[in-house]
């Protein structure tokens, strides 16, 4: 597999850029072995940001992508889709967390920038060893379980049932209704609870 | 929470963080803007069960000053 | 409630608990324990003769929070759904001492079943909604200044609901528990257990400001020449028409005093509340016939164990943890498990209903799919390296690894040997098997040894 990594450093408005020198991160990233292209952008998750990734893959003939931005728990899927739209297997992609685990928890610009560079270096190093992966599918049992028969459980069960699916509603007491049935009139309309 | 970071020595600390708890907790620390020293580098693992002693040895072997396994 | 019982798509299983959950999103297998009711509900018509005739009549009614009495064979409350009775085994003389059996004799459909046993059933489901609700903070254990529960006329807001309810033990007449007299002066204390780091919980329980306003209004409305005092820290009325409702309580004559009550003690048959009025900056003393505490909401008893059974996390207070505080308020970290109502955090009825519908929408989205894409980051075996030792098999928490026989060509004809095989739909990609593998035949895709070592080296070199 050829190695042409693209590194995309997100500024997240000022969320990242106010603490981390993103331009320097991109510049340093450009020097890492395997990196063919590195750039910054204000909001990488936005439409133009994703378009930038897609176009860069095409123009720079990128083979792997690293995005340095927020937590992968936030936007990993967003960027996987963007990478896939550019024609690369979405698993030839790594996300580097320079917001939650860097700019938001550090205030020293120099130290935070150095950390970001290190984190990008780790990401690049890892992505070079990523393999393309294929998604498989599993069947779905079209039935839901609702645990608790109070107002929340009853409402959820009714909505799912109305949507045309089977629901099993399990209640610990011998009657559904929960705390709601113990209430008299309820605010702000003073209608009855039961 | 704050940790005094006013020392000249800057250790190299590697954290192996479980994606489901510690990594999420580190994100939560970020959401709450809790400040801590910038010397730690977090490596995401799918679960602390994935941790191989080999990785810890590798880290020390290559000059890490501390390794934190958390999950 | 009746709509739930009558809906053709809803199977209602009451007096039951979920005791086991295996599987994963789209394919959960759930074990449900049906507790013995000692009444065959298929035969029972709900006529109520057994309840009428049951001689054990003096049991404190849990539904009435001890303010009323019930029989041993009983319904949770008269309008229960399903409207069928069950026997409280601890208080039934037939089940404890083998005496009585009156209900069995009077039942016209022979529905009484004293030999009923608990029963376990298994169900396949694709999604789970948690809606386990709340309990009230146990103020009796924490608040010595309010008497640790030794004054019968110091009650919780839920007790007050029962006293004011037309279906309650007093038929909706507000009477104080000690002597049944109508209280002429009722004091309300807000934030008992809420917003109190030292004795209770740090959070705001969100519904109390409004129900206390309602209670104060009801006192003024139902009892002529009455006084309703409300001791508060703040009045929080963030909701549609809430502020207007609070004004209605004020206009009805409820007297709001900003201050924490430091002590309650008896004087004659009344109670004295010592506090300060922090707006006027001076101490106040109020005599009341009854005191109602707006106690904090806490997670329902047993909800922690259930979270572990189903397999998702809780927050510092034991409420169920949503996947993201703003963007994923009904999801959990366990795919396919959703949250509705106060199990996720204190909230009032409109918010509960809204969140429940939100959870239902998520479930419908999931169930509308015939097949679901799976995460490909799972473990795989290189059979060329696998020695078939089987060490990985018991380590896998999802029972995803099995040993299977394969045939290979050898120098002297075919050889059969065992190799580990990973079931990719059971595997959750935790990678616990990888360090156990002595021949490095196992690897977790996306988190291979090679990749993790590369990360370590990248930092250090």
Image (spheres, coloured by chain):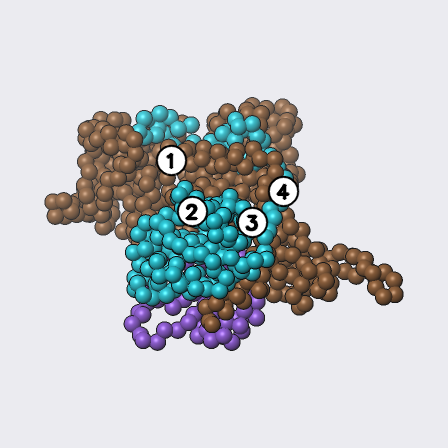
Chain colours: A cyan, B purple, C brown
Query: Quick one: C17 or C153, which is closer to the camera?
Result: C17
The chain containing the residue under callout 2 comes to: A
- Read off the residue under disc 3: A89
Question: Are labels 2 and 3 on one chain?
Answer: yes
What residue is drawn where x is 56% and y is 33%?
C368
CB of mark 2 within 8 Å of CB of mark 3? no
In this rendering, the label closer to the viewer, 4 or 1: 4
Whether residue A6 sits left or right of residue C394 in the image: it is left
For disc 3, the neighbor class at 10 Å (few under 14, some 14 to 19, many from 20) is some
Placement of A99 over or under C450, stated as above or below: above
Q: Which of the marked residues, 4 or 2, is nearer the chain's N terminus?
A: 2
What residue is drawn where x is 65% and y is 66%?
C440
Question: Are labels 4 and 2 on one chain?
Answer: yes
CA gap between label 3 and label 4 equals 20 Å
CA gap between label 3 and label 1 equals 42 Å
Q: For residue B50, what is the image quadrant?
A: bottom right
What residue is drawn where x is 40% and y is 54%?
A39
Question: Are labels 1 and 2 on one chain?
Answer: no
- Read off the residue under disc 4: A138
The chain containing the residue under callout 4 comes to: A
- Read off the residue under disc 2: A52
CA gap between label 4 and label 1 equals 34 Å
- Residue C441 in the image: x percent, y percent? 67, 63
CB of mark 1 within 8 Å of CB of mark 2? no
Q: Which of the marked residues, 3 or 4, is nearer the chain's N terminus?
A: 3
Secondary structure beneath dot 2 equals helix
Visible in this render: residue C190?
yes
CA gap between label 1 and label 2 equals 40 Å
Secondary structure beneath dot 4 equals strand
- Read off the residue under disc 1: C351
For disc 1, the neighbor class at 10 Å (few under 14, some 14 to 19, many from 20) is some
């Amino acid at each position: 597999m050829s190695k042409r990594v693209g590194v995309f450093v997100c500024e997240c408005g000022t969320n990242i850029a106010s603490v981390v020198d993103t331009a320097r991160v991109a510049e340093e990233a450009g020097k890492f072995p395997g990196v063919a292209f590195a750039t910054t952008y204000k909001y990488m998750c936005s439409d133009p940001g994703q378009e930038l990734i897609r176009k860069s893959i095409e123009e720079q003939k990128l083979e792997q992508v690293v995005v340095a931005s927020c937590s992968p728990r936030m936007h990993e899927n967003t960027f996987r889709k963007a990478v896939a739209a550019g024609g690369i297997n979405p698993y030839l992609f790594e996300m580097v967390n320079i917001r939650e685990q860097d700019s938001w928890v550090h205030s020293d610009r120099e130290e935070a920038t150095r950390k970001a560079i290190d984190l990008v270096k780790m990401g690049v190093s890892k992505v070079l060893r990523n393999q393309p992966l294929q998604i498989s599918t599993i069947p779905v049992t079209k039935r839901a379980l609702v645990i608790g028969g109070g107002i929340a459980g009853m409402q959820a069960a009714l909505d799912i049932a109305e949507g045309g699916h089977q629901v099993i509603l399990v209640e610990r007491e011998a009657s559904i209704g929960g705390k709601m049935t113990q209430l008299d009139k309820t605010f702000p309309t003073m209608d009855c609870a039961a | 929470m704050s940790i005094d970071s006013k020392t000249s020595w800057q250790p190299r600390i590697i954290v192996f963080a479980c994606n489901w708890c510690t990594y999420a907790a580190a994100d939560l620390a970020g959401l709450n803007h809790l400040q801590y020293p910038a010397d730690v580098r977090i490596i995401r693992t799918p679960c602390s069960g994935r941790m191989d002693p080999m990785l810890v040895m590798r880290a020390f072997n290559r000059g890490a000053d501390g390794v934190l396994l958390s999950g | 409630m009746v709509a739930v019982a009558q809906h053709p798509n809803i199977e209602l299983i009451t007096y039951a608990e979920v005791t086991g959950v295996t599987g994963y999103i789209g394919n959960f297998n759930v074990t449900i324990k049906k507790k013995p009711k000692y009444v065959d509900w298929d035969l029972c018509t709900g006529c109520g003769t057994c309840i009428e005739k049951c001689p054990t009549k003096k049991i404190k009614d849990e539904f009435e929070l001890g303010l009323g009495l019930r029989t041993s064979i009983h319904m949770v409350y008269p309008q229960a759904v399903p409207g069928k009775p069950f026997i409280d085994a601890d208080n039934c003389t037939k089940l404890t001492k083998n005496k009585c059996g009156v209900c069995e004799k009077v039942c016209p459909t022979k529905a009484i079943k004293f030999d009923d046993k608990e029963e376990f059933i298994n169900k396949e489901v694709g999604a789970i909604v948690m809606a386990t609700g709340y309990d009230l903070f146990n103020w009796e254990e924490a608040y010595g200044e309010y008497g640790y529960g030794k004054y019968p006329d110091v009650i919780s807001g839920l007790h007050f609901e029962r006293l004011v309810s037309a279906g309650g033990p007093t038929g909706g007449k507000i009477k104080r528990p000690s002597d049944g007299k109508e209280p002429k002066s009722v004091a309300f204390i807000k934030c008992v257990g809420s917003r109190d780091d030292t004795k209770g919980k740090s959070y705001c329980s969100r519904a109390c400001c409004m129900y206390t306003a309602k209670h104060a209004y009801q006192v003024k409305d139902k009892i002529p020449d009455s006084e309703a005092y409300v001791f508060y820290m703040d009045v929080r009325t963030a909701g549609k028409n809430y502020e207007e409702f609070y004004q209605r309580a004020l206009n009805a004559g409820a007297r709001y005093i900003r201050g924490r009550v430091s002590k309650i003690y008896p004087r004659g048959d009344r109670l004295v509340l010592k506090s300060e009025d922090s707006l006027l900056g001076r101490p106040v003393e109020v005599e009341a016939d009854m005191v109602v505490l707006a106690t904090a909401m806490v997670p329902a008893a047993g909800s922690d164990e259930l979270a572990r059974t189903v397999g998702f996390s809780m927050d510092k207070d034991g409420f169920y943890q949503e996947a993201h505080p703003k963007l994923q308020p009904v999801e959990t970290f366990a795919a396919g498990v959703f949250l509705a109502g106060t199990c996720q955090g204190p909230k009032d009825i409109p918010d509960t209903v809204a969140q429940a519908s939100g959870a239902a929408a998520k479930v419908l989205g999931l169930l509308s799919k015939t097949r679901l894409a799976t995460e490909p980051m799972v473990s795989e075996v290189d059979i060329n390296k696998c020695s078939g030792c089987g060490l990985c098999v018991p380590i896998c928490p999802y029972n995803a690894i099995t040993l299977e026989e394969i045939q290979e060509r050898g120098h002297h004809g075919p050889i059969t040997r065992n190799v580990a095989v990973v079931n990719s739909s059971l595997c959750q990609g935790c990678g616990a098997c990888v360090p156990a593998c002595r021949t490095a035949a196992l690897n977790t895709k996306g988190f291979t040894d090679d990749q993790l070592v590369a990360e370590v080296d990248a930092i250090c070199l």
